[in-house]
Amino acid sequence: MKPSNIASAFKKCRQEHRPALLTYTVSGDPDKKKFFEILKAISSHADICEIGVGHNCNTGDGKQIQNSTYRAIKNGIKIKDTFAMVKRFKRTKNAKPCILMGYYNSIIQYGENRFIKKCKQVGVDGLIVVDLPWPENKNFSKKCKKNSINFVQLISPTTSKYRMKRIINDSHDMIYYISMLSTTGGKLKVSPSEILKNYNRIKKINKSKNLVIGFGITDKTISSLKKADGLVVGSALCKEISESIKKKQNPVTKVGNMVKRLRAKLS
Amino acid sequence: MMKLKKGKLLIDQHNKNYLYGGKFGGNYVPETLKKPIEDLANLFEKLRHDKKFLNDRNYYFKNYVGAPTPFFKLKNLTKHLGGAQIWCKQVSQANGGAHKIYNATVHALICKRAKKKYIIGDTGAGYAGKMLSMAAKKFGLKCKIFMGTKDIVRQAVNCRAMRKNGAEIVPVDSGSKTLVDAVSECMRYWVSNCDTTHMCVGSTVGPNIFIKICAWSTAQISRELMVQVKKEFGKVPKKLKLINCVGGGSSAMGFWNEFVDYDKNQVELIGVEAGGPKNSKRHAAPLTNGAKIGILHGAIQYVIQDAEGQIEETESISAGLDYPGVSPLHCLLKDSKRARYTSATDEEALQAFKLVSRLEKVRPSLEPAHAFAEAIKIAPRLSEDTIIAVDSCGDAKKDMKIIKERLGRNL
């Protein structure tokens, strides 16, 4: 079987002896047009692009992603627009694998099967559903796998050993480790060595899985976690968009530059 | 059609995925909360069978909350309307002035058993927050209350009480600035602090364990009511109607719990949701108006939302009912047709308050005023041997400003 785009992206990074850089931005933020430009700007430097499907009851997200979400919804983003953008994006020259990240209610209302089918059609490579944990996600993740879409399982510092083993067992190519007890965008309150210790504990259970670390990662903290297979930066980018709007700067170049800086720190 | 099991508490009628009727509820939460929820569920399962814990609960319900709350006939209202007898279970006589004290007290007791020093909670009308701050003070816990900025303004009386009890009010300015966003923000805080902090959800909503603890706590209301009804009538009357307002649904669950197994032709359960302003379309009445099924705050339920699954803003004069979702337990009672749900508008609730407070010594807050509105609507059509019992679950003190504005100064 051909490896997935996500698996290939990690393989390439491993050959370059560096972690993969994953970015997260909310679809339609600050508006549909600029978001597409931001996505293209990110894509020149990032390895995998996570795209947020904004939901207005996003209980896992901190202030920065909430701001981006409300802005995107206010400016009219709909799920069909996100699918259309992914489709267009995947045809561009520098396109990277895309992971949609959101909340389960958006998927239920769209229709589970219809959602997966549409993902496959437009070229979505993976899905992260914040409020669909294991074992609630068993059926859904199986359906994703059948359609060659990576369902990304999450593990957090509170995950018990029992759950960890089963979650890893049911995972696909990529697993997401939440660095600390926090919503997205919190200040990193745990030392990098502590995070890496937990990271190694998970990695030991199955070395073949690509394990990324997210939550609280900024240009200040990213270098200290270079041992991971991948690192996710989200809230810092959302904050950059908010601030560039406030300062009347161009969010496309600002975010593009930030991702470039982040990438440079991983080489 | 969904079927209820007799002889089994409603809160325990879920499958292994914590779904009621195989369909409502569950634990749709971020991974980080799985463990704290599991720990709390295990602890509660132990405590609810622990004699010492039950003794503690009963002791505090009796000596701190004040049990039983009065049950009496509203003679003037009955006479005025003609038809069915209207009775009142004045739960607002409980310490603090509303039913929220039951859940708050139990959560504080659990928090102590879990050896946590911090307790957090959400609030809409401010009663859940006020009671949690009282219980926290009583049991020596540090307390934070999450409250929408719109509610902080309109329920200022309860905010003063919370601050006086030493609680910190965390204003929530996102989205609707009401209860729904207060619950979200409270859950976010718990995600970040679940190792040191106990969370209390203010109603029978949220992940399964919070629904369970809340309904188990408010069930005290119907345990008292059962005794009182039997004392007054010798037995459970042939025609009894239990009317309760429903926002999240905690007081209704408490009011009905002991009566669920009775045939609905004998004991009818009537839930009254918030219909909002007369001409508004943003009713907080998901059960009455056939909202779609979706996920809100970790549980599957009927919830007011748009085609994309975004939760919609609601509008009600009563902050306590101003919530786009509703307890999965009420979804179960609706789909099994055990309870009937309807709504009352802001105006109907205000008129009900006016009539009840003019004729009787009861001052229902704007939430139970919705229940009284339904009682007033149906009583004249019913026979004299029909007993309508209304749960007056909150006191109007917190609403005097709104009531004055809407009904004039002379009340």
Image: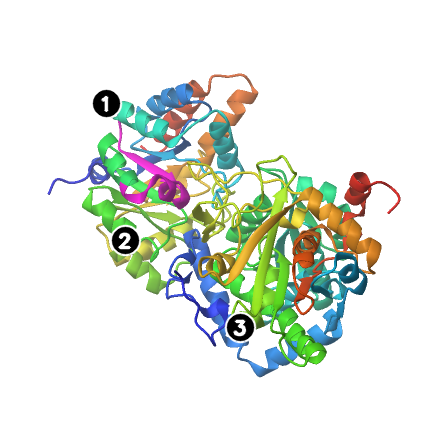
- Residue B69 in the image: above or below residue B166: below
- The amino acid sitting under disc 1 is Arg
The single residue placed furthest to the left in the displayed view is A1
Query: Residue A181, image x and y in percent?
Result: 48, 51
Toward the viewer: B237 or A251?
B237
Q: Quadrant of the N terminus of chain A?
A: top left
- The amino acid sitting under disc 2 is Asn
Query: Residue A246, image x and y in percent?
Result: 56, 21
Image-based side of B170 in relation to B298, left or right: right
Image-based side of A70 in relation to A156, left or right: right
Query: Residue A185, image x and y in percent?
Result: 49, 40
Whether residue B114 is visible: no
For disc 3, the chain is: B
- Which quadrant holds residue A22? top left
Q: Which mark is nearer the camera, 3 or 2?
A: 3
Q: Give the mark nearest the N terminus, 2 or 1.
A: 1
Report which residue position mark 3 lands on: B262
Q: Quadrant of the C terminus of chain A?
A: top left
Toward the viewer: B188 or A7?
B188
Count neighbours of disc 1 (C-alpha within 10 A) and say few if under 14, some if 14 to 19, many if 20 or more: few
Report which residue position mark 1 lands on: A91
Query: Residue A4, image x and y in percent?
Result: 19, 39
Count neighbours of disc 3 (C-alpha within 10 A) and say few if under 14, some if 14 to 19, many if 20 or more: few
What residue do we see at 41% from left, 22% from top?
A32
For disc 1, the chain is: A
Toward the viewer: A241 or B41?
B41
Magenta part of the chain:
A95-113
Image-based side of A27 in relation to B287, left or right: left
Report which residue position mark 2 lands on: A139
Q: Are marks 3 and 1 in contact (CB under 8 Å)?
A: no
